[in-house]
Amino acid sequence: MKITEIDIRRMFQASLWLKGAHSLAEVLGGLSLAFLSHDLIVRMAIALTRAELIEDPRDLVANAVRQAAEGFTTDAQSFAAWYLFSHGLIKLVLVAAVLAKRIWAYPVFIAALIGFILYQGYRMTFDLTAVLVAITVLDLIVLVLAWHEYGFVRRERQRHPGTEG
């Protein structure tokens, strides 16, 4: 099976929509963390894990969720709120600009992805989690697809000068 130019462009479009959805979730998560009290976060973790811990008091995931909520300091909550909100908002704006085919957005989007990937790699040296690895791998895939799409869009603009962007 041969992957065509159209297939790659479709993968890029799909990855942009996934990044946009993920970015929106980050913005909403950041806002939620900014306005939720620590006590409410702990109560929510207890409510979410209660049934599982009644069934199996040694459940690793449920106990990890409770411990994470209880150990979530105000400073950590503030950082997470700021990080999620700013990270998500930057990506959301750039994804929207790339979806609108704004030529300036491609190199900015690529640079932002490189910055996020480098920061995520740095974070992984302290705390290697499956979620962080998955997000980084997705960012790497999107980076390669964005680079390819940017080249395609530039070639198209050269063939058809005067197009908006």
Image (spheres, grey):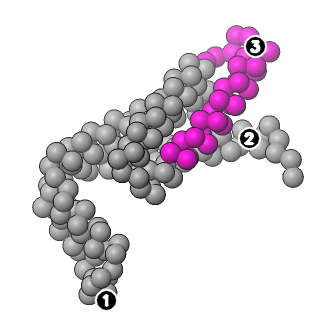
Q: Which residue in the structure is indicated by mark 1?
A: 55
Residue shown at 74% from the left, 41% from the top: 8
Residue 149 vertical placement versus 160 (above, below): below
**Mark number for residue 8?**
2
Q: Earlier in the sequence, mark 3 or mark 1?
A: 1
Which residue of the protein is positioned furthest toward the top in this rendering? 162
Q: Residue at x 27, y 39 (%)?
A: 82
Asked if residue 112 shows in the view, the reply is yes
Q: Nearer the viewer, mark 3 or mark 2?
A: 2
Tell me residue 83's x, y (percent): 31, 40
Q: Nearer the viewer, residue 72 or 49?
A: 72
**Compared to 128, does 27 lie above or below?**
above
Which residues lie in the magenta part? 136-165
Mark 3 vs mark 1, CA separation in Å: 64 Å
Which label sits in the foreground, 2 or 1? 1
Image coordinates for residue 93, horizontal then vertical, percent: 45, 31
Q: Could you say where residue 101 lies in the image, as x and y percent from the top left?
A: 61, 27
Checking the image for residue 158, the label placed there is 3
Point 26% across, 50% down: residue: 32
Circle number at residue 23: none
Image spot of residue 42 (x, y percent): 18, 65
The quarter in which the C terminus is drawn is: top right
